[in-house]
């Protein structure tokens, strides 16, 4: 008699964290893009359905494959039980909801595994480009500088123009946090600077991939970013080519004293 293997068997739980993060980012992207089919939903309805369907699938996958880990996701009730966990999955199924729901391509999917406050595994997907960037397979960033700093299109940080000018960079607005980080990873920008507040799910996966690629990632005062805190608010972030770190932090500090 042939033995069948259940999808809930222990063998399925042997999937390593890096592959699981990538499969999650890929699957979420496929689900979210599928909700656009035929243009049947648009705007807020599209965004709401895409978020709900993708989040439900994600919750089920993690319940099967990592039932003992904590989770933190945008739009999901946070009972703070994650604070008792060493391992916590921090996920944003659509980073850049406005961009997604209006048909733009600069939105992303964020999946990070944070261990003791640090993003040790991360995948950031650009579903409309069919690409997923994994922290375990990303190349170190090198090559010529682009001369560009990317900032938020919807919430540009105060003083960013002055900081960029002091470092000799031009400013370019973009959509989601993940898309902006990946522009630095791909060499299309040299720095991503944000102030004015984000949440942990906006930053965990991009920071994890950036650090794995040898980029600098910190708060705007230069301190490391820690995750799985009681308050999920994260006020700012700088991701940049490491050789520009001191110049940008110094320009930011000088700008902060003027405001």
Image (cartoon, rainbow, N blue to C red):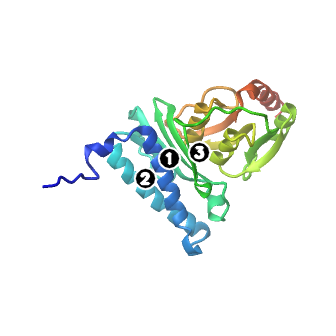
Taking depth in this image into account, of 204 and 241 the one nearest to the observer is 241
The structure residue drawn at horizontal position 44% and vertical position 51%, both measured from the top left corner, is 77
Name which of mark 3 and mark 2 comes first in the sequence.
Answer: 2
x and y percent of residue 238 in the render? 69, 34
Cα separation, mark 3 vs mark 1, equals: 8 Å
Name which of mark 3 and mark 1 comes first in the sequence.
Answer: 1
For the question of whether residue 13 can be seen, the reply is: yes
x and y percent of residue 3 in the render? 18, 52
For the question of whether residue 157 can be seen, the reply is: no
Identify the residue under disc 2: 58
The structure residue drawn at horizontal position 55% and vertical position 62%, both measured from the top left corner, is 33
x and y percent of residue 51 in the render? 51, 59
Identify the residue under disc 3: 202
- Are the residues tagged 3 and 2 within 8 Å (C-beta)? no
Identify the residue under disc 1: 91
Taking depth in this image into account, of 2 and 61 the one nearest to the observer is 2
Looking at the rendered image, the quarter that the N terminus falls into is bottom left
Q: Nearer the viewer, mark 3 or mark 2?
A: 2
Taking depth in this image into account, of 164 and 80 the one nearest to the observer is 164
x and y percent of residue 2 in the render? 16, 54
Cα separation, mark 3 vs mark 2, equals: 17 Å
Looking at the rendered image, the quarter that the C terminus falls into is top right
In this rendering, the answer to whether 139 lies above or below 250 is below
- Are the residues tagged 2 and 1 within 8 Å (C-beta)? yes
């Amino acid at each position: 008699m042939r033995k069948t293997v259940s999808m809930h068997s222990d063998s399925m739980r042997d999937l390593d964290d890096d592959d699981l993060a990538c499969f999650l980012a890929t699957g979420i992207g496929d689900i979210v893009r599928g909700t656009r089919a035929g243009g049947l939903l648009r705007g807020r309805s599209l965004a709401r359905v895409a978020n709900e369907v993708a989040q439900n699938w994600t919750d089920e996958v993690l319940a099967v494959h990592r039932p003992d880990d904590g989770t933190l996701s945008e739009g999901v009730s946070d009972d703070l039980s994650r604070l008792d966990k060493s391992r916590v999955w921090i996920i944003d199924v659509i980073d850049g909801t406005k961009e997604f729901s209006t048909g733009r391509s600069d939105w992303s999917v964020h999946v990070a595994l944070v261990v003791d406050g640090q993003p040790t595994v991360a995948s950031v997907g650009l579903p409309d480009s069919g690409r997923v960037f994994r922290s375990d397979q990303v190349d170190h960033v090198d090559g010529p500088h682009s001369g560009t700093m990317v900032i938020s299109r919807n919430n540009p940080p105060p003083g960013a123009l002055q900081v960029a000018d002091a470092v000799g960079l031009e400013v370019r607005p973009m959509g989601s946090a993940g898309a902006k980080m990946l522009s630095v990873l791909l060499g299309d920008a040299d720095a991503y600077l944000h102030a004015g507040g984000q949440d942990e799910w906006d930053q965990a996966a991009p920071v994890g991939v950036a650090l794995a690629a040898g980029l600098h990632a910190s708060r705007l005062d230069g301190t490391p970013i820690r995750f799985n805190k009681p308050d999920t608010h994260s006020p700012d972030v700088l991701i940049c080519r490491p050789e520009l770190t001191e110049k940008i932090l110094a320009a930011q500090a000088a700008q902060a004293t003027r405001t």
